[in-house]
Amino acid sequence: MATPHLPPEPPTASKPEPELELEPAAPRRGALFRLSASIDGAMRAFFFRLGYWVAANPFKTVLFSLLVVAATLAGMLRFRSESRAAELWVPQGTVALKNQAYVEQRYGQTVRASTIAFVQKEGGASLATRDAFLQMLDVASAGYYLVADPINDEEGADGTPITYEERCLETKDAAGNVICRTNSVFNLFYDVDNVVKLENGRVDFFATVRVRIESLSDAEIKRVLDDPPPVNFDDSPFNADEIIGKENGAVRILMYTQLANNKQIVEGGELIDKEAEKLEENWTVLLLEGTPLLNGRVLDWYVESLWSQGDSLAEALTGDLPMLAIGFVLLGVYIVLFLGDFHAVRSHMLLALGAIATTGLALGACFGISSALGMFFGPVHQILPLLIVGIGIDDCFHVTRAVDEVNQKESNHGKSVQQKIALALSQSGTAITVTSFTNVVVFLLSAISKLPALRFFSLWAAVGIFAAWGFAVTFYTALVTFDLRRQDAKRRDCCPCFPPVQEVKELNWFKKPAGGFSRFFGNTFGPLITRPIVRIVLLVLFVAGLAACSYGASQLYLKFEFAFFYPSGSAQREYQDQIDKYFKLGSPTNIYVRDRDLSTRENQLSLLELCKSDGVIAKNEWIQGDTLDCWYNAFRNENGVEGDDAVVDPQTFADRVARFLEDPLYSRYSSSILLKDEKVEGCKFSVQYIFLDTNDDEISSLESVREAADSVGFGNAVDEAPAAFPYIFFDTFSEQYAALPGEIGISLGLASLAVAIVCLVLIGHPLVALISVVVVGIIIIDVLGLTYFSGINLSSVSVITLVLCTGIGVDFVVHIARSFLEQVGTRTERTIKALETMGPPVFYAGFSTFLAIIVLSGARSYIFQVIFKGFLFLIIMGFLHGLILCPILLSLVGPASFYADEADKENAERVLEERIVGRQGAADEKLERRDEATEEESV
């Protein structure tokens, strides 16, 4: 907004309020302008009164602000973090979450898998050798027989040592020996006729396999690996494609997985199983850092467990936080140096510390209020300090700039500090309210998202931005009052306790007058970009850039893997890289039949249709038919039932199932059948998808298999939910992928609508509002295109980044556009004046954010990598479009000014100021008369 021209003498309360019109009778001032002018006038009046009070009571304002923050921090008692993926990234109320709730209720939680990937060393010997297998056995058995220290806290175990054998998922071999179940290459060499037993009578799996391996030659081992049997020793399927990895016919990777029962509980927004986590932590550390295992190794190995996954995720969330801290230090140094001029008196180094403190109060209030309202703190929330500090510092820059401008104006030299602060806040308060209001509305609209992480991040951001605005116009304004008093007293900035200077020099430390950056925009940059030939060249470049980025944006597609969350260089990421290198695996899944009496003939036939090798599941285009492992097929064979129309006698069905599960060969199916009160109420069986290359494939495969399972009719329906359905945990992410395009469209659409409405109302001219919205839209398209060219595609994290771009992108455009309408002269002259007035604060705001995020260029976390690139592209495009494209468009097709000439502008600004000052003066005079009367009464 342009600075009002103040009258030489402030009006007194006794003067009647001028009867002048705020605007001349010109046809270009329609209803929209009058509405915008009314809103602007009301805001300026409000902020004048607020500034007048704050400047009169700075100590009270500071104390009140601190008390407000202290009160809000009480809300931290309800602070809760959330790290469960299903609670962060999955749209709530989806079919997958409902299926998950049913599965966990009826079947319990899934098992815990701890996996070792044995990989041939670069240039090393083949894994298909006896020496390699013996070392693999050494490594695997060391982890298996590990004894972890007991957990002695009040919520842990009873203090006894923790062993894997006590937590393992059990199975039985053909001889009925109980053994811990593994899914590994060692199963191929387990000899049920020559088992080695421990002192407690249990089979020593590794010793049994070792005896077998030592009896074989390298060639014999290779033959077994080249032609493995289709089943394990316990008759479960042996899927060689996910255990033996080859390259050019040579064995490059072999897998070993041990399975344990999962006993997780929810604690503090996290799934906790303390015993298992302790065991897995020790297991991981031993295998990756154990010196005895590393000596003389002829192969490499990589490990995965639930603990290592959580550890890698924690590393992703906390490993880059020191970088953010460095960024904030750089930001602090920048603020201290550039908040004011390089001048003994007019600099603002101490005030800069106050600006940092202001953002700290905003952060404290944000945490307290959001926590009190029950909103969780998720992984993405870690960028909130960056967002709030950036916006808060921007607000402080605007307030400081306005105060300096008012203070340096010759006509204001006779005014009190209280009047100067009030005048400055009436200008800057309105400006930061426009941008803050836009951002708050954008984030509030984004909070309707179905993705919990985006919804709660948006709500936290809205609270934080509002808090930053509130403390900027109160707490920080009080600090500016102290600083302005210091300047009026001619005291040095960094040493206000020292004696004042004799004379305040006009030139700064570099012998330059104040406002050098404004002169650069007004005398050099503005005239350069508005030259006709330069405008043409720049517009051609912008069109070419828009075309390229539009192509990039059109090529974006869903691409996300949970492994993206693991930071580069972490143990979990290295493991995943090896799996991706040597395997093209399809995801496993289970088919569930819920709450049905499976003994009836009708339901047995329906179950057969699901289980048989030519049934609807095995023949589905997304399923590897030979991976189907259904208990019902083995059950029918065991009972001599043949033919698609034959079933087991319903009257003896449950008894036969019970006897079937007692057989050692089929005991592994015990967890797959819901046998209760001599009735089979439901079941599940496993199958595997083909390799799914894209997220779209994952969505299509899930929908297809759901339709196939639901197409089989089961009797005895108990609700409207499908009787049969596929489910695995990662289905919840497939639901997210399916929802993301709609989420992106809704989020960007509502955010753009909010920007358009705010621009239309607060800018006051449809054409300028349209130009602003179009430029913001181009910024978003360019950011999308650059996102694609940088190797990032659509994901839940990039959606959050796009919302940030929409909200913050408007800050680069609106200030210039609004200022253009308030200047007088030709289009080119008004464009240059707008750049001279608003170019510096726009640049300072963008550059301060750039300093805060530049250190994240080396981030290992996927979240911070995406956020860094998004912010970097936004700042670059914001600068280019806000400071170049928008001014060029305004200089070419911008509408006429709000004012006919300079006199008209000065008249309108003087009348508005006189009304504000006059009303405040009248109020002050009334208070003085009341105080005098009170004193007389007391006398």
Image: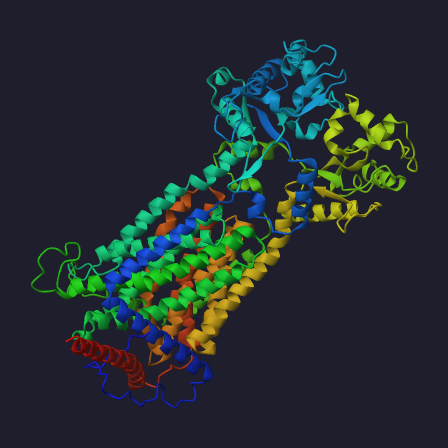
Percent across and percent down for residue 785 are 52, 56
Residue 163 against residue 730 in the figure, above or below: above
Q: Quadrant of residue 108?
A: top right
Answer with left or right where residue 58 lies relative to residue 187.
Answer: left
Quadrant in which the N terminus is drawn: bottom left
Name the residue: 53% across, 32% down.
307
Q: Is residue 546 left or right of residue 360?
A: right
Image point (32%, 51%), residue name = 331
Rendered location of residue 316, percent (x, y): 47, 40
Looking at the rendered image, the quarter that the C terminus falls into is: bottom left
77 relative to 129, above or below? below
Q: From the viewer's perspective, is 456 left or right of 134?
A: left
- The chosen color scheme is rainbow
| Residue occupying the point 64% across, 31% down | 111
Viewer-side residue, 6 vs 880: 6
Which of 682/798 is in front?
682
**Image mark count:** 0
> How far from the left and from the top, in percent, is residue 843?
34, 61
- Quarter holding residue 909: bottom left
Q: State whether residue 832 is above or below residue 230.
A: below
